[in-house]
Amino acid sequence: MELNNKTILTGVKPTGTLHFGNYAGALKPAVELGHQVNREGGRHIMFVADYHAINAIKDAPLLKQLTREIACAYLACGLDPKTSYFYKQSDVPELFELTTILMAYTPKGFMNKAHAYKAAVDKNVAKGEPNDAGINMGLYTYPVLMAADILAYDTDLVPVGKDQIQHVEIAADIAGSINAHYGRQVFKLPRYFTTEATETVPGTDGRKMSKSYNNVIPLFADDATLKKAVMGIKTDCQDINAPKNPDEILLYQILRGIAPTALVAEVRAGLEKGGMGYGTIKKMLLQALIDEVGEKREKYMYYLTHFDEVEDMLHDGAIRARTLVQPVLERAKDAIFNRK
Ligand code: ADP
Ligand code: TRP
């Protein structure tokens, strides 16, 4: 993909402590992409979507902690706050002004169809509760704030997991209808893209690794906790010497999502041939996890315990980000208030 002159933007919602699924599917590819974009002369924007999180998290100390963890995780994984734009959404007030503008051009029907809202309604229906029980307007209008996040920077590309595609499409639709209405390009139309890396890593019980299922291998835990999680991965009781189909074995599927290709190939061959026991593979997986995050874990702990340094980076990032947003907001106001 040609990234020269392109603006690539990703937001991360601080709603849970990170696990290896998040790492393989989101964190690692985002940081790598950031390096690539910056190298190739594009612009990379990476922010913590803390205002999106308040729809779900009302416990203030918890929100603070999760926000810090996400910021420190990105830095620990190598995000460069000097070359990328790295900030908290709540530090860029122009986004909320833009949200109000976009609201006026967002058909209510779009929000009825947005799947975060639909999923919440489905849950209520399943429990026999009124459709909108416990659903706040922040959740309902979630895609509009997300559209502001994206349109504010004339974003070209938004790397996302499959669940977020619809939101990027809504942002493009809103932008398109505003441009059509005023007969000029007020906003750039963003596009989403998904990568193979966002393939789902299973958790220790075989379902998608997710904080909601209590089946995670936590990302920055100590060795003993990692070991406990790895040893807890469900295995079957096939004979150790029997040749096996690796694609049917959970332990292999987890390894494939996380470990280096050479190790994945070695384990694949071992399973196909027979004779490689699950205990041995678990040890290999554990070592691979420690090798992958050992150094990052130290950096992560450093940043968490020196958060004032991170605070400065986020603060500088927000100042830089605001210089990008302000002209876009002015462009929108010129059109809607007929100023220019
Ligand atoms: P969770 O399922 O733990 O609640 P989120 O939905 O908050 O995780 O996901 C945050 C990011 O991490 C998303 O970009 C998502 O695509 C990625 N992600 C989450 N779980 C996995 C997984 N098991 N495999 C790959 N990527 C994942
Ligand atoms: N909705 C995204 C998520 O739940 C987070 C997010 C907020 C985002 N604003 C964004 C992602 C803008 C990409 C672009 O993961």
Image: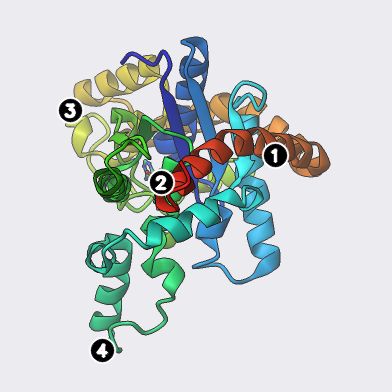
Q: Secondary structure at mark 2?
A: helix
Residue 314 circle label: 1
Is residue 15 among what the camera can see?
Answer: no
Instruction: Identify the residue position indicated by label 3 in the image.
Output: 243
2 or 4: tag closer to the N-terminus: 4
Instruction: Identify the residue position indicated by label 2 in the image.
Output: 335
> Viewer-nearest of labels 2 and 4?
2
Instruction: Identify the residue position indicated by label 4 in the image.
Output: 128
> Viewer-nearest of labels 1 and 4?
1
Depth check: give the residue in front, 141 or 64.
141
Q: Secondary structure at mark 1?
A: helix
Amino acid of disc 2: Ala
Q: CA distance from mark 3 to mark 4?
A: 48 Å
Is residue 106 among what the camera can see?
Answer: yes
2 or 1: tag closer to the N-terminus: 1
Image coords of residue 152 (percent x, y) = 47, 41
> Viewer-nearest of labels 3 and 1?
1
Depth check: give the residue in front, 177 or 303.
177
Q: Residue at x 22, y 64 (%)?
A: 113
Amino acid of disc 1: Leu
Q: CA distance from mark 1 to mark 4?
A: 44 Å
